[in-house]
């Protein structure tokens, strides 16, 4: 407290100066809606939700919504249902090896990993997979560079997650399984369209 008083004692207060409001996120100091939107949407992704990686992609709205729910860990996987007192077998429907979580299903499952390897090899990229869905999107946006495949680059995480989710549901609810080769072709068709 004494330090604050000492600092204030050194300052001179000018009675003739007029107080004014200054918007710190604008170089001119004036507030605009455009400036607010720029500050909200252009902030670093590591600080918040990676919404630009989801909503600014050219993916269909239902795929964007799914990616948004997966990032928030609100996808009804077995672990999600278990937290709501649903008791049943808790194995990944695709690989039948690990517990089914949103992170396992979309990032680490053998089926999803095969799509990640295929998509990244098409672009000539080496990648170490992060642990969680949100971390994938944040790291993916950081790695993005302006190039000819820029539009495809933005779509790859969503284009991988959607077929994995569709195949998971087909296996679970319809009892139909694709071979891994057919699954990769399904992914490529979806990425192309």
Image (cartoon, helix red, strand yellow):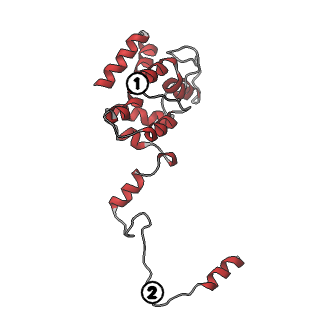
Q: Nearer the viewer, residue 156 or 33?
A: 156
Q: Quadrant of residue 178?
A: top left
In the picture provided, is 19 more to the left or to the right than 11? left
Q: Which residue is drawn at the image coordinates 40% and 51% (left, top)? A: 42
Q: Indicate the secondary structure of the residue bearing disc 2.
A: loop
**Tag on residue 7?**
none
Q: Position of residue 7 (x, y in %)?
A: 64, 80
- Mark 2 vs mark 1: in front: 1
Q: Nearer the viewer, residue 123 or 7?
A: 123
Q: Which residue is mark 2?
A: 17
**On the rendered image, what quadrant is the N terminus found in?**
bottom right
**Tag on residue 119?**
1
Note whether 76 is above or below 138 in the view shown: above
**On the rendered image, what quadrant is the C terminus found in?**
top left
**Mark 1 neighbour class, 10 Å CA radius: few under 14, some 14 to 19, many 20 or more:** many
Q: Report how many numbered discs are placed on residues in the image.
A: 2
Outermost residue toward the right in this view: 2
Q: Indicate the secondary structure of the residue bearing disc 1.
A: helix
Q: Quadrant of residue 97?
A: top right
Q: Quadrant of residue 188?
A: top left
* Lower position in the chain sequence, tag 2 or tag 1: 2
Look at the numbered discs 2 and 1 and tell me whether their residues touch, using CB distance below 8 Å: no
3D distance between C-alphas at marks 2 and 1: 61 Å
Outermost residue toward the bottom in this view: 16
Q: Position of residue 14 (x, y in %)?
A: 50, 89
Q: Nearer the viewer, residue 105 or 128?
A: 128
Q: Which residue is drawn at the image coordinates 47% and 33% (left, top)? A: 70
Q: Which residue is drawn at the image coordinates 31% and 20% (left, top)? A: 189
Note whether 180 is above or below 148 in the view shown: above
Q: Position of residue 76 (x, y in %)?
A: 49, 27
Q: Position of residue 25 (x, y in %)?
A: 42, 63
**Mark 2 neighbour class, 10 Å CA radius: few under 14, some 14 to 19, many 20 or more:** few
């Amino acid at each position: 407290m004494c330090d604050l008083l000492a600092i204030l004692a050194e300052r001179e207060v000018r009675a003739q100066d007029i107080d004014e409001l200054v918007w710190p996120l604008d170089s001119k100091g004036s507030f605009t809606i455009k400036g607010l939107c720029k500050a909200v949407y252009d902030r670093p992704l590591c600080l918040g939700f990676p919404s630009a990686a989801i909503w600014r992609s050219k993916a269909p709205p239902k795929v964007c919504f799914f990616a948004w729910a997966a990032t928030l860990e609100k996808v009804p996987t077995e672990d999600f249902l278990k937290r709501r007192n649903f008791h049943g077998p808790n194995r990944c429907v695709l690989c039948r090896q690990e517990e089914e979580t949103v992170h396992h299903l979309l990032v680490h499952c053998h089926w999803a990993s095969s799509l990640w390897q295929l998509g990244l090899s098409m672009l000539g990229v080496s990648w170490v997979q992060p642990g969680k869905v949100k971390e994938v999107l944040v790291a993916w946006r950081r790695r993005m560079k302006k190039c000819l495949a820029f539009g495809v680059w933005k779509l790859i995480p969503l284009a991988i997650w959607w077929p994995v989710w569709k195949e998971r549901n087909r296996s679970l609810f319809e009892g139909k399984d694709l071979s891994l080769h057919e699954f990769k072709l399904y992914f490529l068709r979806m990425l192309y369209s």
